[in-house]
Image (spheres, rainbow, N blue to C red):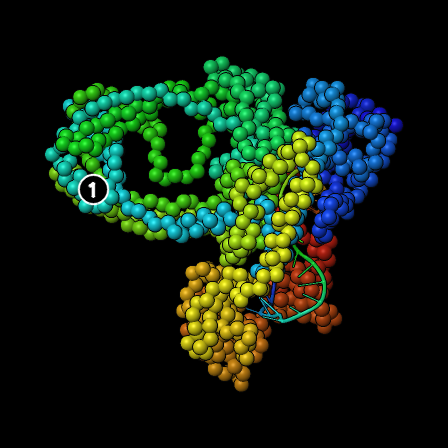
DNA sequence: CAGTGAGCGAGCTTCCGCTTGACTT
């Protein structure tokens, strides 16, 4: 009989803890929640808000094991995380495993070290039912919102859509940013930079300076340059200020995702997958955390490492404090388990992510960087505006030696970093070498990418470390947003140069505002967002989560009954849902009238159809059925014109007849095609379906026939189900619905293969079932 | 991977947070 059973949430944690506790303790893992609301049903009694929980099928085996072990154990220690969800996990375990109060102890620890765990064992407590109820409130509220709102969308917009407290607000952020960008008006300005040399100085010393104002247009800029022709330039003032830079806090899930995106180009899902592997192999601490806290163990180890590698002067121990809204801090920050491991073995991706985590952690315990910033003001005779030259000298690099935080792009923000100024003194005369006025255009705010969206959600306190990556994939799966590249705008920028006594003008070709991997809303996303915003503004409010979190806190503190909160919320919410569901409207959500079809006189409009955005001519009430056309990918509900919409109805069109049946041309899922006698032939790339002639179409049909004949390379009478065919990727064997690739040597004489040879290939490849292509190429860890 | 080119209807879809599972090159 086992004396003690400890249950934690994660198996990797279980393994570590078991080592600390010795033979009297068995440590198992619950793998997160073991029980939840039923998956497919609403599962909430709306009279008293009693939830109906079930153990999901994939957990039954585990739960049975836990039950058996608990029965055998003298004491069961519930050691799930110290946060709302963790408390609920303990409570569910208590209920499901049928534990008795005298047999059960609830413990928590803040770091996975032997003293911390022993300390926890010394100080057990009871399950905090208020905290559990706060979790139930959270769970039930999310279910109500999700399962009541989604069906409204199915009815009003399109089947299989979804809405939720987190995802719908994430989409809102992206839609609103896109609108801002659409409304953005770029403004022109001229910034002026100059190159000076100190009078009677030695060759090669130059001073770069920028004018402390900008000009609205070319005329003003030119006038300024004209005035500079005869002006004198004098150093009016030199100021030197010491500056400090402090390191960033150690990684949380969200900051790790941001930095890995910036520095390593990982998606948030990639980052989490790689971090998970590092965690499982014991390299780093837990990767889903909102805490910037470091254990004393880690701080001490970091100090030692810094001393050894860089010297005492570089050490500065710090404890950071979480400022994030709604943080629950059940774990440490993400850090290496062993700080003295400066690098690890593994795939290149694992090594790079580890390196990033190591550097960030070490830097957080290092001294400030000391910088000396020099600003020289250069007076222009007869003018109010002045040039400013800035230079920066790093006096002591401190943490910058190992880590530099990256920032969101801002092309206008040019730093003075690394820019050195020669020795200068006040009153010194400068000679102008060159002054340039550079045309600039203000840029629209950047679209979100995955990482910057996570950052924003975290700022708003929406979502949790464990859900950032899944949320981002959900809103893409629902096709509310798509990740894409935006072509920039080609622009010709004017450069005016004053050199000697002459002002010249050049033009510089540049691309402005090009973006990669950004999240762009789709029509469905936009329509759903506008709809929800109109009918459920409270849920869509950026502060909704923060407000309900406050109420959850009250429940956790025992100030409010959780069912009362549900009653209040549901009482307001449910009537709105009913009202919206039953509202009769003449037009479909998101519908937009474009005009009249000149041919039939019927209205032409766009809407979200059963299968996405469509153009429709005529209505269902007409005698004739309405005509539909799927919109193209690059078109949008909001911007498509009547002409573009009518264009979509020009296909399919008949070209004429060939061999007695019509030849027509259309466009489908895979691009334009020719249709003849029920057979399809794809149009080769670059052919315009609107201008293809009958002759060209017939040629394509005949070519396809020829290829079809040549496709059959070999057939056997004894085995009619087997055939050697010629495909896009060379010859292959088709047998009973499966395809088998031919090895090179056999492919060369595909026409002469024997049945035996073919069967051998089939047999061999059947025995070694091919796997689907995998991205995972990591080497096996021992 | 190996050829594709719908649908207008039955039944289904859906939330957020905890946690990993199991395929082999």
Which residue is tagged 1? A221
Q: Nearer the viewer, residue A525 or A22?
A: A525
Residue A166's x, y, as percent?
58, 45
Give the left or right position of residue A342, taking residue A226 as reference. right
Res. A276 image quadrant: top right
- Residue at 67 percent across and 64 percent down: it is A734
Q: Residue at x 58, y 72 (%)?
A: A708
From the viewer's side, name the closer residue of A92 and A205. A92
Q: Is residue A182 left or right of residue A454?
A: left
Depth order, front residue of A436/A331: A331
Give neighbour class at mark 1: few <14, some 14-19, many 20+ (Cα, 10 Å): many
**Chain name for mark 1:** A
- What residue occupies the far bottom of the structure in this picture? A660
Residue at screen point 49% across, 60% down: A633
Q: Is residue A267 above or below residue A689?
A: above
Confirm whether residue A512 shows in the render.
yes
Secondary structure beneath dot 1 equals helix
């Amino acid at each position: 009989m086992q004396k003690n059973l400890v249950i934690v949430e994660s198996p990797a944690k279980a393994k570590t803890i078991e080592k600390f506790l010795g033979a009297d303790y068995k440590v198992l893992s619950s793998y997160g929640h073991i029980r939840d609301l039923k998956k497919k049903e609403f599962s909430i009694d709306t009279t008293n808000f009693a939830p109906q929980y079930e153990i999901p099928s994939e957990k039954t085996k585990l739960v049975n094991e836990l039950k058996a072990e608990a029965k055998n154990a003298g004491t069961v220690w519930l050691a799930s995380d110290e946060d709302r969800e963790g408390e609920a996990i303990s409570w569910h375990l208590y209920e499901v495993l049928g534990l008795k109060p005298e047999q059960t102890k609830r413990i928590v620890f803040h770091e996975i070290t032997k003293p911390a765990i022993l300390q926890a064992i010394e100080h057990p407590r009871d399950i905090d039912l208020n905290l559990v109820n706060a979790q139930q409130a959270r769970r039930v509220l999310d279910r109500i919102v999700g399962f009541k709102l989604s069906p409204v969308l199915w009815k009003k917009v399109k089947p299989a859509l979804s809405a939720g407290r987190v995802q719908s607000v994430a989409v809102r952020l992206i839609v609103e940013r896109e609108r801002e960008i659409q409304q953005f008006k770029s403004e022109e300005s001229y910034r002026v930079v100059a190159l000076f040399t100190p009078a009677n100085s030695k060759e090669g010393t130059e001073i770069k300076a920028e004018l402390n104002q900008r000009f609205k247009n070319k005329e003003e800029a030119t006038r300024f340059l004209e005035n500079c022709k005869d002006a004198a330039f004098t150093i009016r003032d030199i100021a030197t200020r010491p500056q400090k830079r402090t390191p960033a806090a150690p990684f949380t899930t969200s900051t790790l995702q941001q930095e890995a995106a910036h520095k390593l180009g990982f998606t948030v899902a990639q980052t989490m997958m790689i971090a998970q592997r590092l965690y499982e192999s014991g390299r780093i601490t837990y990767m889903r955390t909102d805490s910037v806290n470091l254990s004393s163990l880690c701080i001490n180890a970091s100090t030692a490492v810094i001393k050894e590698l860089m010297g005492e002067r570089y050490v500065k121990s710090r404890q950071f404090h979480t400022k994030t809204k709604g943080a629950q801090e059940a774990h440490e920050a993400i850090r290496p388990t062993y700080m003295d491991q400066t690098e690890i073995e593994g795939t290149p991706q694992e090594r790079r992510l580890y390196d990033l985590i190591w550097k960030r952690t070490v830097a957080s315990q290092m001294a400030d960087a000391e910088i000396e910033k020099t600003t020289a003001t250069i007076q222009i005779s007869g003018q109010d505006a002045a040039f400013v030259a800035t230079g920066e000298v790093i006096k002591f690099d401190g943490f910058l030696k190992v880590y530099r935080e990256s920032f969101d792009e801002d092309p206008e923000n040019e730093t003075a970093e690394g820019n050195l100024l020669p020795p200068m003194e006040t009153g010194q005369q400068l000679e102008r070498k060159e002054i340039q006025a550079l045309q600039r255009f203000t840029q629209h705010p950047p679209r979100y990418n995955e990482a910057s969206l996570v950052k924003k959600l975290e700022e708003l306190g929406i979502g949790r470390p464990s859900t950032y990556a899944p949320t981002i994939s959900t809103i893409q799966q629902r096709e509310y947003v798509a990740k894409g590249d935006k072509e920039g705008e080609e622009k010709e920028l004017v450069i005016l140069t004053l050199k000697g006594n002459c002002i010249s003008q050049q033009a510089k070709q540049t691309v402005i505002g090009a973006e990669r991997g950004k999240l762009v809303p789709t029509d469905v996303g936009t329509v759903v967002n506008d709809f929800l915003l109109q009918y459920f503004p409270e849920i869509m409010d950026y502060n909704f989560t923060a407000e309900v979190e406050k109420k959850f806190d009250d429940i956790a503190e025992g100030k409010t009954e959780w069912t009362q909160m549900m009653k209040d919320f549901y009482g307001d919410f449910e009537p709105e849902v009913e009202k919206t569901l039953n509202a009769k409207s003449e037009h479909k959500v998101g519908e937009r009238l474009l005009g009249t079809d000149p041919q039939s006189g019927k209205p032409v409009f766009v809407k979200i159809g059963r299968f996405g955005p469509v153009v429709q001519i005529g209505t269902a009430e007409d005698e004739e059925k309405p005509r539909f056309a799927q919109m193209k990918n690059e078109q949008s509900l909001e911007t498509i014109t009547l002409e573009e919409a009518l264009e979509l109805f020009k296909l399919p069109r008949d070209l004429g007849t060939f061999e007695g049946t019509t030849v027509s041309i259309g466009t489908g899922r895979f691009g334009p095609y020719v249709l003849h006698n029920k057979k399809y032939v794809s149009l080769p790339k670059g052919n315009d379906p609107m201008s293809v002639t009958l002759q060209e179409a017939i040629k394509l049909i005949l070519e396809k026939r020829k290829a079809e004949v040549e496709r059959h390379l070999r057939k056997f009478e004894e085995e009619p189900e087997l055939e050697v065919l010629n495909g896009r990727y060379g010859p292959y064997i088709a047998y009973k619905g499966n395809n088998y690739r031919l090895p090179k040597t056999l492919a060369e004489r595909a026409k002469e293969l024997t049945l035996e040879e073919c069967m051998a290939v089939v047999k061999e490849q059947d025995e070694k079932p091919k796997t689907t292509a995998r991205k995972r190429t990591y080497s096996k860890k021992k």
